[in-house]
């Protein structure tokens, strides 16, 4: 009887604390709820869970661990943080998380989220993993807690996990979009030399996917382009150019494809341009005293400048007349 009354009191306190902050999470979860909850609401839920665990004679070791984590996080700087900020925090404790150069060099000493240090982020992550499993284990030993009460207790945790899941889904979709932009149907066609170079370059840090599987934005350019055009004495003239450089893909939303159009392409390219001593199509770039300059591509549009005695400003468009060749 005493235990049932105590549980009822805990349920009532949980109901009041939840009602003051946000509505209970339901099947049709409102994404705005995660903005109304703070870490303090999550800590209140954890405390309620610990008390239920003790009354239900659940695992005392896990309950004690939850208690210690709550005590660590129960500081104004942490407890006042909205759960949305916590969900979006870049500080993670996963195996793929790498420290930046500035943090290793101790130039960046402040936490990425004010008030939330690396240890606090790890404590929050551990707490949110322990809470649902421990609470459900505790409830197996009592019938005094209804399903609605469980919803109230877990509402802040559900809100946080829902936000994290949405962010994770968004990141996965963005990763797929980047792979499609680089390797999909709208990506520039590579010649045989570029295919070989970029295949081997996958083992070079600048070109390989990062530890979390995101594609590198860079790609090697090594092309023979006989279709550059210039104006000499008011007449159009073809110039053959060898290009050696890099292509950099633009990951920003609204760029690339039909949505970006000509003004906002999905990639740019730059590097060294080499042409032979004479103008003309299908002329060896190594013929005579080669002219050296630079090229810049903005999507499919490209412009190049050649130095030397016969300076040239050249323009062309990214295309392949013969697949895999030029």
Image (tube, helix red, strand yellow):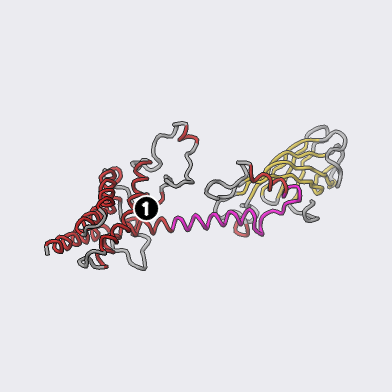
Q: Residue at x 80, y 44 (%)?
A: 230
**Quarter-of-image position of residue 153:** bottom left
Residue 326: x percent and y percent? 79, 51
Local secondary structure at mark 1: helix
Residue name at image x 20 percent, y 66 percent:
144
Q: Is residue 243 left or right of residue 23?
A: right
Q: Position of residue 12 (x, y in %)?
A: 18, 62
Q: Which residue is mark 1?
A: 84
- x, y percentage for residue 201? 67, 44
Where residue 139 sits: x, y (%)? 25, 63
- Residues 204 and 105: in front is 204
Residue 271 shown left or right of residue 225 in the figure: left
Q: The magenta stretch spans which residues? A: 166-195
Binning the other alpha carbons within 10 Å of mark 1 as few (below 14), some (14 to 19) or many (20 upward) gives: many
Main secondary structure found in the magenta portion: helix
Left or right: where 289 falls relative to 183 = right
Q: Is residue 188 above or below residue 141?
A: above
């Amino acid at each position: 009887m005493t235990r049932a009354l105590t549980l009822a009191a805990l349920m009532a306190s949980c109901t009041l604390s939840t009602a003051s902050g946000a509505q209970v999470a339901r099947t049709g979860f409102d994404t705005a709820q995660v903005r109304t909850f703070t870490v303090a609401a999550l800590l209140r839920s954890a405390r309620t869970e610990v008390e239920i665990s003790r009354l239900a004679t659940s695992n005392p070791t896990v309950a004690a661990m939850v208690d210690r984590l709550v005590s660590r996080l129960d500081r104004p700087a942490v407890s006042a943080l909205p759960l949305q900020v916590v969900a979006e925090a870049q500080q993670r404790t996963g195996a793929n998380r790498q420290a930046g150069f500035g943090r290793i060099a101790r130039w960046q000493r402040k936490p990425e989220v004010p008030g939330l240090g690396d240890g606090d982020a790890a404590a929050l992550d551990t707490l949110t993993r322990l809470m649902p499993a421990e609470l459900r284990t505790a409830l197996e030993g009592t019938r005094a807690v209804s399903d609605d009460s469980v919803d109230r207790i877990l509402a802040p945790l559900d809100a946080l996990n829902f936000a994290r899941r949405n962010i994770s889904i968004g990141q996965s979709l963005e990763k797929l979009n980047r792979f499609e932009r680089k390797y999909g149907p709208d990506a520039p066609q590579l010649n045989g030399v570029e295919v070989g170079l970029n295949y081997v370059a996958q083992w070079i840090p600048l070109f390989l996917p990062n530890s979390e599987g995101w594609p590198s934005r860079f790609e090697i350019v090594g092309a023979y382009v006989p279709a550059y055009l210039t104006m000499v004495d008011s007449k159009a003239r073809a110039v053959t150019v060898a290009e050696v450089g890099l292509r950099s893909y633009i990951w920003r939303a609204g760029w690339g494809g039909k949505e970006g159009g000509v003004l906002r392409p999905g990639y740019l390219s730059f590097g060294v341009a080499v042409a032979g001593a004479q103008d003309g199509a299908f002329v060896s770039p190594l013929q005579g005293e080669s002219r050296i300059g630079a090229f810049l591509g903005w999507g499919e549009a490209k412009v190049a400048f050649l130095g030397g005695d016969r300076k040239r400003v050249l323009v062309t468009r990214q295309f392949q007349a013969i697949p895999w060749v030029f």
